[in-house]
Image (tube, rainbow, N blue to C red):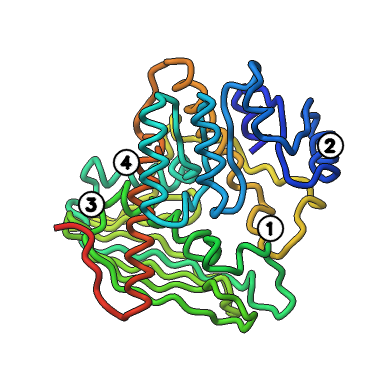
């Protein structure tokens, strides 16, 4: 967050944490003028206009409410909250206060995902009918795999559904339309004693008539399996990283990324800042470019400048919608039912 904020031209004036020594050390390392454990004191400062929240999900609501009540603009990480009701209360508060509110769905700005979304919107494959989103990695398969304490606990918003599934839910919503219903399973491939899942498998249907599967595991010991593919009435589009291809009756072609969707290159964080196995998700720095674009949009919205809505930024309204889907997935996994979300 700090690196992307600065890349977007924003001044990082303060770092707020729980442990005074650790917070001071991190602030010093990244040249942040103020280190504090007193959030209210920092929110009262005239030189603080906006807040970015990069804390465990179960803490998001209280922190975001405090920032909103102080009149600060907010970017909040995903998963947004613990459930839809908590998300709705945050959205309503932000709207009432008139502050800019964005959600940390940075991969809306990833070149490959953004291009797929645009191609489908422009009719490149006709009407989407079948979608497949797969990601299997061995990240947390080993017995010694460490995760932050909160991540292993379902009650604190932990688990792979929130960590990775929230990104896919946002991709489905922006690319294919709102969810109409889901049938899901949440499970653990690795035996770590966690109450939160390391694997999810979801069948979904959208209100636009697309049937799909989103399945992912952070504990599959096999080779990487990554697929993002959507078939429609006139063709199929898929992404291989940021390379996007379309197949239709004229053949298969690679689609060039338009200049306005090109993001800065990946920039790995300092290696010694990666402590747990879970931290390794960020080791390549692939989110640096998309997050820079997100914070550039945040900056322009605060300044009242017009923004390009292709891709549009995710707001707290999207956070509410995503939590509605996640709540439905959890209900389905608990009782084995198909859960309807919309007509």
Q: Nearer the viewer, residue 10 or 50?
A: 50
Of labels 4 and 1, earlier in sequence is 4
Comparing labels 3 and 2, the label whose residue is closer to the camera? 2
Q: Give the CA distance from mark 2 to mark 1.
A: 18 Å
Crowding around mark 3 (Cα neighbors within 10 Å: few <14, some 14 to 19, many 20+) is many
Per the image, label 4 sits on a secondary structure element best described as helix
Crowding around mark 2 (Cα neighbors within 10 Å: few <14, some 14 to 19, many 20+) is few
In the rendered image, which residue does mark 2 sit on? 29
Comparing labels 3 and 1, the label whose residue is closer to the camera? 1
Asked whether disc 2 touches disc 1, contact meaning CB atoms under 8 Å apart, the reply is no
Of labels 2 and 1, earlier in sequence is 2
Crowding around mark 1 (Cα neighbors within 10 Å: few <14, some 14 to 19, many 20+) is some
Q: Tell me if residue 222 comes above or below residue 303 in the rendering.
A: below
Q: Give the CA distance from mark 3 to mark 2.
A: 48 Å
In the rendered image, which residue does mark 3 sit on? 125
In the rendered image, which residue does mark 4 sit on? 118
Asked whether disc 3 touches disc 2, contact meaning CB atoms under 8 Å apart, the reply is no
Identify the image quadrant of residue 39.
top right
The disc at residue 279 is 1
């Amino acid at each position: 967050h700090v690196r992307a904020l600065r890349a977007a031209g924003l001044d990082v004036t303060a770092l707020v944490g729980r442990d005074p020594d650790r917070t001071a050390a991190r602030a010093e390392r990244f040249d942040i003028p103020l280190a504090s454990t007193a959030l209210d004191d920092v929110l009262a400062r005239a030189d603080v206009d906006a807040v970015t929240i990069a804390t465990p999900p179960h803490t998001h609501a209280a922190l975001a409410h405090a920032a909103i009540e102080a009149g600060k603009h907010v970017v909040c990480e995903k998963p947004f909250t613990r459930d839809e009701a908590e998300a709705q209360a945050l959205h309503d508060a932000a709207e009432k206060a008139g502050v800019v509110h964005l959600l940390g769905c940075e991969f809306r700005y990833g070149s490959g995902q953004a291009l797929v979304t645009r191609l489908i919107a422009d009719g490149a494959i006709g009407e989407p009918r079948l979608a497949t989103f797969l990601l299997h990695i061995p990240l947390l398969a080993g017995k010694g795999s460490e995760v932050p304490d909160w991540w292993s606990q379902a009650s604190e918003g932990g688990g792979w559904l929130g960590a990775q599934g929230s990104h896919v839910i946002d991709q489905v919503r922006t690319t294919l339309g709102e969810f109409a219903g889901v049938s899901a399973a949440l499970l653990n491939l690795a035996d770590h004693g966690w109450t939160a899942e390391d694997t999810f498998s979801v069948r979904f249907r959208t209100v636009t008539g697309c049937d799909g599967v989103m399945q992912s595991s952070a504990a599959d010991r096999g080779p990487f399996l990554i697929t993002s593919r959507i078939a429609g009435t006139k063709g199929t589009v898929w992404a291989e990283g940021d390379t996007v291809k379309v197949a239709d009756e004229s053949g298969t072609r690679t689609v060039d990324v338009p200049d306005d969707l090109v993001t800065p290159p990946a920039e790995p964080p300092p290696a010694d800042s990666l402590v747990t196995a879970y931290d390794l998700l960020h080791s390549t720095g692939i989110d640096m470019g998309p997050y820079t674009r997100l914070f550039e949009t945040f900056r322009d919205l605060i300044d009242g400048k017009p923004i390009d809505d292709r891709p549009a930024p995710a707001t707290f309204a999207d956070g509410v919608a995503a939590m509605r889907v996640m709540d439905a997935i959890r209900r389905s996994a608990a009782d084995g039912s198909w859960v309807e979300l919309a007509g």
